[in-house]
Every structure is written in structure tokens, then in C-alpha cells.
Amino acid sequence: MTTPDHDLRHHGDAEVRADGAGLVDLAVNVRTGTPPQWLREHLAATLGELAAYPDGTAARAAVAARHGRPVTETLLTSGAAEAFVLLARVLTPRHVVVVHPQFTEPEAALRDAGHAVERVLLVPSDGFRLGAVPEEADLVVLGNPTNPTSVLHPAAAVAALARPGRTLVIDEAFMDTVPGECESLAAVRDLPGRVVVLRSLTKTWGLAGLRIGYALGPADLITALGAAQPLWPVSTPALAAAEVCSAPAALAEAEQAAQDLTLHRDHLLKGLAAFAAVRVHGEPAASFVLVELPDAAAVRARLREHGFAVRRGDTFPGLGPDWLRIAVRDPGTTDRFLDALGSVLAVRTGTGR
């Protein structure tokens, strides 16, 4: 098996550790100001239950109801990352395709499990639009909306990849950042083959450290994935989060956050458009924006000197050294970042905005 030519284990949190701990974090896509106070209090109230083994019955039912699926088609996991590992260990595909650029953990998990991986690379000149994959592929993995491109693929285009004999895995970790979750396939149960949708509570609710996600798919596959989990894989506080964040009040709050995010992203895009050297490909739809600019690695380093951490793009297959991913923040933070970017570009080009 070939060695990956990208650092598939690099993630945005590396930008804000050690000497980056004091930087304004535009590298990690978790919503700022989270978890909200009501969620903190709800999680804290579970600490008195830690002597008992976790019981996921209520949380699993809540997640299933949230997506209109039977409980048997729902599996709670220790973050969406665990689901990638479970799929890689349980499935026995002959021809694996991962659509890139996208989150690299699925490919890393597949390679770790001994699978050969073919990459289908979407191109910036086409706005990273979803295209064809090899017909013979019996396992296809893609993200929607996709990290790091922020492109939201139409549900019809994603569904068109489903085939008899094929397992289609869709990473929807950022779907709750899209108002109305309009292109989600989480509730769709009648496509050919096996379709698995993965979700996470990390981004909107600020629960990266709690590790809670889930998989939705055919009951037989969900059963097999569950059998591959260790006993009690999801903690009592994480189960409480899954249950309460699936409730109507929390869904309404998440929807409002997604609408606010849309306005904040538009503000960032308008500011970026003022820089001749910066290009955005496609139409961003999630909580981050991917940009192309010359000598991005040096720009990233200089931004750190100005107090801002952004995510390098060259660890994503299909991208190179001229790419950066920028998290969407409130307009005030964005304006300070744009001023810093202007200063950095002015020094490098002598022009600035």
C-alpha cells in the first residue's frame, strides 16, 4: 500500500496549541462562545450519575426522532471520527474512493485498516463541484458541506452516487451550519445500495472535547458497526448532550446560529473580495472559507505575528501550498483579521487592498 503524500493526521487545532495558544483562533471551525450556558449546566448536572454505566437508550431515541428514522438505524459514537474507524474495520470493499479535497480522517482510517484508497479530486476551476466517481467503486466517501472547501453539494447530486452494491458514506458534520439543512440526506431511507450519513455535535455546540457524534444508515450495517464498538463507547455527559441537542429548542437555536453565520460569512467574503491576490472558488456554505493566494505559507506565518491563526491547506489532497482555510467569526473579529491580512499582503506585495 502506498504511503499518503499528505499529512492526513494534521488538524486545525495544531495551529492554536503551544506557541499558538494566545492567537485569535480562525483555524478551528467550532462556533465561538460555546457550549452555551444552558448546555454547560445540563452537562454539569450529569456528574452525579457518573457512578452508573452509561445508558444510551434515551439519547439514541432522541437522535432517531430528530431525523425521522427508526432507532435501529441510529448509532451513537465517540465523535464522528469513531464512525470512520468503525466503517473502515467493518466493511470489506474491493474498490474504495474518497472524494477530495475533504476531511482527511476517513482516508486515514481506511488506510490504517489496510484498504487501498483511490482519490477523486474535485477542481477549483469548477468550483469544487461534485462530479463522477468510478462506476466500479463499492465504497464512496465524501463530505457535504465539504471541509475544507465549504462547498455544499446538491442533495440530488450526492444521491445520484448511490448504487446497488455500493456503500455511500456522507460526512455531514457541518450540515447544521447550513440554514434549514437543505441538502441533507440524513432522513432519506429509500436510495439504492447502502447510504450512511455521519453527523457531529462538535461544531455548532462546541463539544469537541466531549466526543459525541452519530451514524445513520441501514439497520443491518448499523448493527454491525455497533458490534464493533467497545462496551459503553459514549459517556453519560455525551449521551446527555446528544439527547438535549436533538430537542426542538436546541434545534431552533442551531437554526438561528446558522442564519447568523450566513451573514457573518457574507461579511468575510466581502472583505476578502477587496484583496486582488485572494481567490475564493465555488460558493462557501459552511462555517469556514477556503482561499487561494500566492505564498500562503508565508502569509499564514505573518498572520501569526499579527495574532491570528488560520488553517494551512496543503495537508488536504487536491490542494497545495497556496491555500488557507479561514473560520467565520463575528464581524468585529473578521474586521480585525482583514486589517491584519491587509498589512501582511501590503508588506509582501507593496499594494495591500
Image (tube, helix red, strand yellow):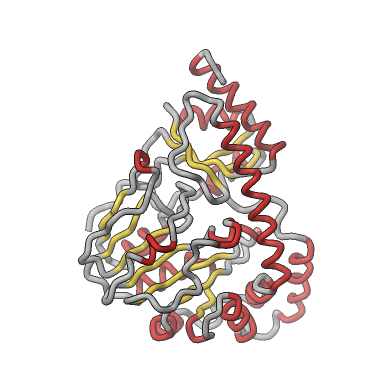
Residue 107 spot, x, y in % from top left: 35, 59
Residue 288 spot, x, y in % from top left: 55, 46
The image shows residue 282, relative to residue 270, as above or below, that is: below
Determine the residue positioned at 60% across, 80% down: 65
Determine the residue positioned at 53% across, 85% down: 71
What residue occupies the far top of the structure in this picture?
350
Q: How many marks?
A: 0
The image shows residue 264, relative to residue 132, as above or below, that is: above
The image shows residue 150, relative to residue 98, as above or below, that is: above
Residue 231 spot, x, y in % from top left: 52, 83
Decide which of 251, 225 is in the foreground and name it. 251
The image shows residue 186, relative to residue 144, as above or below, that is: below
Decide which of 196, 284 is in the foreground and name it. 284
Determine the residue positioned at 53% across, 25% down: 275
Name the side, left or right, on which 40 lies relative to 192: right
Name the side, left or right, on which 179 lies relative to 231: right
Residue 353 spot, x, y in % from top left: 56, 20
> Quadrant where the N terminus lies?
bottom left
Name the side, left or right, on which 315 lies relative to 179: left
